[in-house]
Amino acid sequence: MSDSERTAIGDDVRETLLDRVTSQSATVGASVPDEIEVDGTALDLSAFIVETRKVDAVPPALDRKVTAARDALRAERERRLDRLETEPIDRETAEALAEQVIGIDRALNALEGIRRPGFADEHHADTVAGHERWLAFVDQVR
């Protein structure tokens, strides 16, 4: 089909796709695009999600990179969602955008699932370290 033969989607199709991508369960069982471009860089989205799920916790040294990746994905999601909401696009493009938004949501969910040490974890680690120092001191005194 040539570009001149393609017609912009109607409001009902647009609304259906928007409902799909904003649904709480949109990412459940959804297929993920293999690759997506974020800020001009191709990202292997499927591999990214698989690798991210293998990580138990974010090391402090990588926290800024993880935060930057999350922010870049959120910005890209918003750009694509805005395009889906406002631009005159054909059905094929609209469906591809919807799939991409859902794929980005899955990547964001995976990033959010990585545990970051919080105050309670840091406090516990400090307490344990304090006890270890105290025991080492007691051992030296004996």
Image (spheres, rainbow, N blue to C red):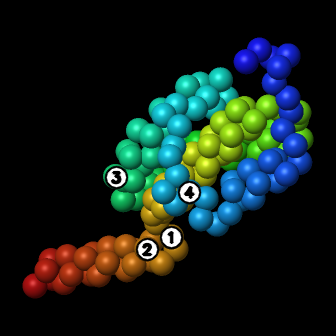
The numbered mark, 4 or 3, whose residue comes first in the sequence reads 4
Residue tagged by mark 4? 27
Could you tell me if the residues under marks 3 and 1 are in contact, i.e. CB atoms within 8 Å? no
Residue 37 horizontal side relative to residue 126, left or right: right
> Residue 8 occupies which quadrant of the picture?
top right
Instruction: Please identify the quadrant where the C terminus is shown.
Output: bottom left
Question: Closer to the N terminus: mark 3 or mark 1?
Answer: 3
Amino acid under label 3? Lys
Of residues 88 and 58, the one nearer the viewer is 88
Tell me the crowding category of disc 2: few under 14, some 14 to 19, or many 20 or more residues within 10 angstroms, Cα based. few
Q: In this view, does 49 lie above or below 1?
A: below
Q: Is mark 3 on a helix, strand or loop?
A: loop
In the rendered structure, which amino acid carries the disc numbered 2?
Answer: Asp
Task: Place residue 135 in its image quadrant.
Answer: bottom left
Horizontal relation, residue 122 to residue 38: left or right:
left
> Which kind of residue does numbered mark 4 sit on?
Thr
Residue 54 numbered tag: 3
Q: Name the residue under label 2.
A: 121
